[in-house]
Image (cartoon, coloured by chain):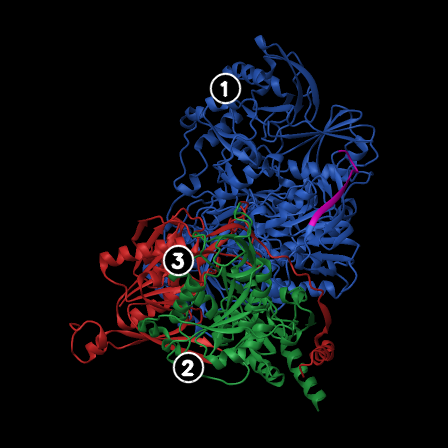
Chain colours: A green, B red, C blue
Amino acid sequence: MLLVLIEHDRGVLGEPALEALTFGRSLAAKMNAACHGLMIGADESAAQQAAAQVGAHGATQLYTVQHEVLSDFGPEAWGESLAQVITALQPAAVLACGSERGNEVMAQAAARLDLPFAANCIDINPSDDLAGEGDAAGGGEGAGGSWAVTRIQWGGSLLEDADLVTVAPDAAALFSCGLHTVVSAPLDSLDPSLGPPEIQPVSVQLDAELSRTVVRERVVLESGVTLPTAPVVVGGGRGVGSADGFAALEELAELLGGRVGCSRAVTNNGWRPHSDQVGQTGTRIAPDLYIAAGISGAVQHWVGAMASKHILAVNTDPEANMVTKADWAVIGDLHEVIPAITAEIRRRKG
Amino acid sequence: MRILCCIKRVPAPGAKINVAADGCSVDAAHLGFTTSPHEECAVEEAVQITERGGGEVTVLTLGSVEAGEQLRYAASVGAHHGVLVASDGSSWDPQRTARALTTAIESLEADSGTFDLILFGNESADSGGFQVGVRVACALGRAIVNGVKGIELLERKGEVEGKGQSEGKGEGEARLRARREIEGGFEVYEFGLPAVLGIKEGINLPRYPTMRGRLASKKLQITTLELDCVAGGQKLRRLHRPAETVSETSILGQGDTGVAAAVDVIEGLGLM
Amino acid sequence: MDEFPSSAKCVVIGAGIVGNCLVGHLTKLGWSDLVLVDKGPLPNPGGSTGHASNFIFPVDHNKEMCLLGVQSANQYRDLGLSVDSGGIEVARTQQRMDEFQRRMTSAKAWGVDAQLLSPEEVRELVPFVNTDVILGGFYCPSVSVVDSLETGTVMRRLATDNGCRVLANTEVLDVVTTPGPNPGESTVSAVVTSAGTIETEYVVIACGVWSNRIANMADAYIPLVPAVHQMADVGPIDMLAHTGKEIGYPIVRDMDTYCYERQSSGSMEVGSYAHRPILHHPDEIPSNDEAALSPTEMPFTPDDFDPQMEQAIELMDMLGDAEIKYAINGLLSLTPDAMPCLGEVPDVRNLWSAAAVWVKEGPGMAQAVAEWMTYGYPRVIDVHGSDIARFYPEERSDEHIWARASEHFNKTYGIVHPAEQWESRRNLRVGPYFSRQQELGAFFFQARTWERPHWFESNTDLVQRYGLSERPVEWDNRWWSPICNAEHLNLRENCGLVDLSAFQVYELTGPGAVAYAERLAVNKVDVAVGRSIYTPWLTPDGGFHSDLTMMRMAEDRVRIVTGVFDGGRDKFWIRRHMPSDGSVRFDDLTSDITTLGLWGPNAPAVLAQICDFDLSQDGSPYGSLREVELNCGAAGTVKATLFRISYVGDTGWEMYLNWNDGPALWDTLMRAGGEYGLRPTGGSVYSISGRLEKGYRLMGAELESEYNPLEAGLARPRVKATDFIGKEAYLKARDAGDPEVQMCVLTVEDQHDSQGRKRYMQGGNEPIVTPDGKRIIDSHGRVSRVTTAGPGPSVGKHLLMSYLPAELASPGTQLGVVYMNEIFDARVATTGAVFDPDDSRLKS
């Protein structure tokens, strides 16, 4: 059985959950195994709400874990919960999305069970290397084994082919799939014949001490569209030239209901806060359109932007990396082109 | 405050990373080396904490002798002690690395007392395993939160109230608040020391070493620990570059001439 | 995108400061159909220009480097892309203070404003300098900081506005050549790039550190190596930021630590030439994609820089607390002899080099190459020291390039004596007498690849005999010995034996040999068999390309003998102009033929011991060639060509013989000469004192492309009827009447300096000045300066050669020579010879 950790925030499924489910469905097929979902800290109604989506991705069981310590997200409490579920259900493999929380919870569970964990995979295959054990790797309940994975290194600039071997034969292998490396299937494209999964609570014993790392407080600085979810991101690089130079980008982003992003050079110059940084050490974005203005496209930045569905580059250098990787490009000075685009959109909107 | 920062020496590549002939490592023949960016911020944070409230920063790395360069770099920006857990320089899997670091930390703590705070980078720039800090924290039985972009140390209530430390933990315990970014804001964690944090870039803007700092760092005495630990279950087979996605870029025009076409594109995507 | 240019007149590879300026200058000179290619992006494709410190200290002892630096600074200035920041070299040692006196002298020679400063005066200009560690400064107000990237862009635009095509991000994969036109040669035909192939007539390699790799694609060589120059940018520093300028304080060169400090807005760039030489093979330079910064900004190796940091903090304490924001092992180009590589590359026609050029010389050298390509020779100034044809095959090997680059890297800010010898890569080429000379205690000077005895310690006894002594100041005495003068006086009194194996000997053979030789030479080559001519070879503009001897060996054979410093350039020139119809064959006989010089009043008597030939002026007249057999005793008979000629002023012969026969003749002559006072005699007599007393000109010293035979005093009364290269210009110069300047010999009338020490000018471009200390320049801007200086032991004076305006060229004119920043009285002696002006000794 493949167990998919369904990431949610206070019961609400986000993009990472859908990516994990999408990836999990194909992995389960390769394993020739059932795909089951797990929601930690989700109550009955949250599970009910999620059930349709979870089921549409082919999961036949949806496990839930509830405990008073699980009042909100907490890496230790979630990790311990996951560990206990793994021990109880003995899945062959466990998959999460390689989001911040997904990787953290998987690492916690892996640490607690002393199991290997391969983060940010883009391909996972049960391996036939364990001769004589037949379909042990991908097969029946409780089977451990050997796996061949391809995972992300250097933020995606390199890929690593690795073997993952669970030492104990009945131990689970833990994986996460690289964030935004899977295009989550829209609900209406899924098989409507698949019914909702059976919801099944699993009980865990959690030490009260685990509550120490449960979220204490949330501070909302801004409402509305955020960088990771914005349909349009207007990114600026060194070519913007100054903090003030971002005003024109802000204006365009606002007009399109998007957000401003930036390269690492911009953050290092103190022109924008780090939270606006798109890249390996910043935010990974996946908007419908990324307008990259004055960005050369260094790999640090590119790996954070490469999941964008479409890219429009504005650059004076027609040979800049970002231009050659874009779908469209306007060759010119962003200080002229961006305001002109804004004006033209205004004109057309009337 | 005694702070330990665990750092990793990584190559500083350009836009294209080449794989070495062995197929298992980055071809660093003409590359410089640096400290993984998140960890550079961790060192800076640790130094700032001790600059404000006193204490000492120890940096620890697992690697070949050359990794001493990164320990010295940390010393050049304010770290006080350096520890090298000597390896052959090959890539150790996350479990093996975590076991070695745990053993090393236990040994250091047995000699000189507990580290109030142990800082890791959220993930390394190269292998990006996202787990060593968590594994070490679990092995040490300490709280850990990853993705931290803000630390606030809370006063020791016991000391403030003049009760001394005889009561041990409880209200005399030192605590911290850690911030982590979420969409549109941040979430806050609060827990007692000793603790472990996975630090993310953006928590600060690390300083560069001064010339005097660099010169002083040459005097750093590096403590070398020799240990080995059994390998874990993840075994690197080979590294390779992802297939190049060749995209045909459509040049919409030069300067103003491209503007209308660009807006057509935006309109065509239904984004207006 | 425009269509790919499948053909062009000329492809320039490399869009750094040199390539950009080159297409700009070519355009100005009327070229069109140019293509500029670079594998990197614009405006900074990732070569050395992109990380250059971009400052120009104009004063250099070397004429080419100084004047092309000044020329370049002026071009930057004219474009409005430079700032005159001023610059100060500071001294921490007395030797450096002495060197500053020499730099003041060079500044005077080249017309650069400069002054010496006390430590306090340094601090007035640069208030953060610690005066406790310096003894003084050398200040040039015209030191400038330039914008090399923008200059490149402007020059490139000038070209593109006139049709030049630019291909950025386009890598050159091959330079295609076709064999011919003559055997052993090839001709450029195309450049293969990552974007397609360009058929082209000319290719210029201006790709800095990558140049040799590109040249190798055409089986050619540009001997340079990428070498590290470390640089760190430290800041922010309030004091600098408050200037509000890119550069608000003069640049400081901390000469004795081989370091500089140059403000860049709010921070300071500290650069070093002090670290160990760090050389790279071009293949080790990462691509633009692979490099963390740019390809030529390689990873910093901090251990190498630490000593410089300590010294920098010593000089400027505020640097200690500044942050090291950026530090690189920046790559630049070094050659085996510290000079650039300009000109057409030997053996591959129409393949040109504009390499090993730094930002400080870029625009000027680009201009020189553009003129060279256009007019057949540079016009801006003579650049023979940068001519890529100067290198011998031994100088093209990686081993040689690396060894020499390693040796001179730390001399970038060093104090280099004009006669300084290399330590590495010695004994590459030695004469057949080498072991004998070693036994005689020869002190060897290396002339390019060839070892030549400069004096013999075995002649020490002569020093006492002639009452000679060392020079009082160590600098004057360095690379010199009183034995030099002793050998000179002995030659004048008795005779001397000089090893001339370094002569480069070429022959032209075939039905067209004489006709072709005529085309090269100003003077008539078609003389009787057995006669020789001494002749200039001119550039198309009528200046000197060469000055050498040609011998009519047979009806269809002409021998050419030239000096070792010019052999490469002359060989190239001969092959480059040779007809391709097969009527002439070229042979280089240098390795087969050795030459011995035997001169002095006793020379005929010595030679008479071993030969029956009539050695009188009748039997062996001046300038004649005679095939003889010399009796070498037990070693048998040796065949030799006796050439009655003298470059030292006393009668005697150059004897050309088979290399392997050399030792026998040497031994025989040494034995036979014993009773006649024959001594082995070094190059100091041959190339300096002997020739100076006779006023003989030397190519590369007195003779340069900037001067013509009339000015040099080498014009014959009549011009031959046959055509020759430069004839038109030469005739025009003759028609213009008396030359504006004349080559003169001057005597130093009082060699004592202000401290009462006797000083000896070295021939390092010391300016000749009016008695009141004014520079002397002609209407072309050419300055009167010492081209050769040295002792005249037989006339009892220190001698100087210099071009002087005609009105000052008359004997007796009182002038001055500046040496170590002091003026010494000098007097014009003659335009001819100060010793035996009638040549009576030659004809005796």
Check disc 3: other Cα within 10 Å, few if <14, some if 14-19, many if 20+: some
Identify whether A333 is placed above or below B4: below
Residue C677 numbered tag: 1
The region drawn magenta spans C173-183
Residue drawn at (54%, 64%), measured in percent from left and top?
A177
Label 1 to label 3, Cα distance in Å?
Answer: 97 Å
**What's the magenta bit mostly, secondary-structure-wise?**
strand
Where on the picture, by quarter, is residue C236? Answer: bottom left
SS assignment at label 3: loop
**Residue B106: x, y in percent?**
28, 57
Q: First in sequence, mark 3 or 2: give its number.
A: 3
Amino acid found under the numbered disc labelled 3 = Asp
- Quadrant showing the C terminus of chain A: bottom right
Residue A114 numbered tag: 3
Reading the image, the residue beneath label 2 is A218
In the drawing, does residue C291 fall left or right of residue C136? right
In the drawing, does residue A123 fall left or right of residue C727? left
